[in-house]
Image (spheres, rainbow, N blue to C red):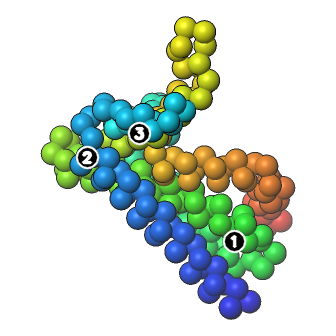
Amino acid sequence: MKNRTLTLSIAVTAIVLLSLVIDQIIKLYIASHFALNESHEITSWFWLCYIENNGMAFGLEWMPKFALTLFRLVAVVALSWYTHLLIRKPETPVGYIITIAFIIAGAMGNIIDCVFYGKLFGYADWFYGKVIDMFYFPLIHNSAGEVIFFRPVFNFADSCITVAVFVILFFYSKQLNTDFKKKEQEPAEEK
């Protein structure tokens, strides 16, 4: 039990740190080698771009910037605690724990942008930085040549979150349902 807990703790920490390093290296490379809104076609279906967004993954915006950054911080703390609890349960699938680690890493990558990049690049105060996005996959065009799928420009951190969420939905939804059902039953059992 202790070996599994230690091994998983090290694995989760390594995944988060490695993902953060990759994410930040890519973002800093793009910010230092591209002009804002500059794009380079790598292939007809893959472009590197330099855009900044104020919002969530894929440029979505649904709350003020400061609130979004605080929400991300709270989410990372909550997911980190949840992961800590999962690691201590021997019945929790390792793959499920790993996917949660990628979600934490992705959220932290975008938090770093929001908290530090405004000050680092001199355009905003702490917590008001913009997220750097660079990957663009214009896969399907209509007859007029306009991109109809996939329009969003995103970054490595967004990819970590998105892929992990899909993996959870397709492979670990039963685990997620089990965890939430246990939480719902706990207050009833205490009465």
Asked whether 45 or 21 is in front, the reply is 45
Work out whether mark 2 precedes mark 1 in sequence or the reverse, and give the earlier one. Answer: 2
**Left or right, 111 with reference to 156:** left
Residue 1 visible, this orientation: yes
Q: Give the x, y percent position of residue 186.
A: 78, 63
Residue 66 visible, this orientation: no
Q: Residue at x 51, y 46 (%)?
A: 158
Q: Secondary structure at mark 1?
A: helix
- Where does label 3 land, which residue? 48
Asked whether 147 or 10 is in front, the reply is 147
Give neighbour class at mark 3: few <14, some 14-19, many 20+ (Cα, 10 Å): many
- Where does label 1 land, which residue? 86
- From what the image shows, is residue 166 above or below residue 87? above
Q: Give the x, y percent position of residue 35.
A: 24, 37
Amino acid on which the number 2 mark rests in the picture: His
Amino acid on which the number 3 mark rests in the picture: Leu
Q: Secondary structure at mark 2?
A: helix
Q: Give the x, y percent position of residue 68.
A: 42, 42
- Where does label 2 land, which residue? 33
Can you name the residue that lies furthest to the left here? 122
- Mark 1 or 3, closer to the camera: 3
Give neighbour class at mark 1: few <14, some 14-19, many 20+ (Cα, 10 Å): many
Rendered-image quadrant of the C terminus: bottom right
Q: How far apart are the two marked residues, 1 and 3, measured between alpha carbons? A: 37 Å
Query: Based on the displayed image, in which of its 4 quarters is residue 89 positioned?
Result: bottom right
Q: How far apart are the two marked residues, 2 and 1, measured between alpha carbons? A: 41 Å
Work out whether mark 2 precedes mark 3 in sequence or the reverse, and give the earlier one. Answer: 2
